[in-house]
Image: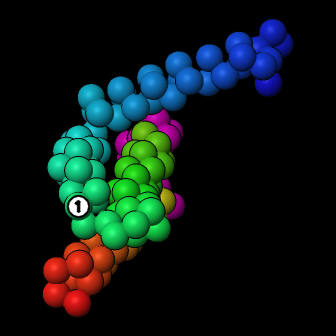
Amino acid sequence: MKPGHTGLAHLAHSTRYSMKGLKAAFRNEAAFRQEVTITAILLPLAWWIGDGPVSWLLLVGSCFFVLIVELLNSAIENVVDRIGTEHHELSGRAKDIGSAAVMLSLILAGLTWGLLGWQKFIG
């Protein structure tokens, strides 16, 4: 921790850095913008589809999980690109693994929404 940044001051600085990161991701990452748009559309639907706090949390949480994983993937990609743009097996592997994490989070969100939607409307 930096000297002088404790308590509420630390919280204020951390919040500012987090907001800066969200703005940077939204400005520079097309996939993040798309996922934020989809989340904005799905969040109101979660109130309708969710049959209680647990199902609502699963629906909303799966959307936020996708955003979190996308942010981490973008951070990995930025660090790898900062190190160098020349092809390296480990750099490619790191980017591919980050992309796979995003794919799995999207599958999880799709399954969550699909199963809870099925339960609400068909089951």
Image quadrant where residue 14 sits: top right
Does the segment drawn in magenta span residue 81? yes
In screen coordinates, is 84 left or right of 15?
A: left
Name the residue at 27% across, 51% down. 43
Mark 1 residue element? helix
At label 1, which amino acid type do we have? Trp
Where does residue 1 sit, x and y in percent of width and height?
79, 24
Vertical placement of 51 versus 65: above or below? below
Let me know if residue 114 appears in the view.
no
How packed is label 1: few (under 14 Cα within 10 Å), some, or many (20 or more)? Answer: few
Image quadrant where residue 117 sits: bottom left
Residue identifier under label 1? 48
Where does residue 51 sit, x and y in percent of width and height?
34, 70
Image quadrant containing the C terminus: bottom left
Q: Which residues are magenta?
A: 79-91
Name the residue at 81% across, 9% down. 4
Let me know if residue 48 appears in the view.
yes
Where does residue 92 sit, x and y in percent of width and height?
41, 60
Where does residue 25 sit, x and y in percent of width and height?
35, 35
Residue furthest front as drawn: 52
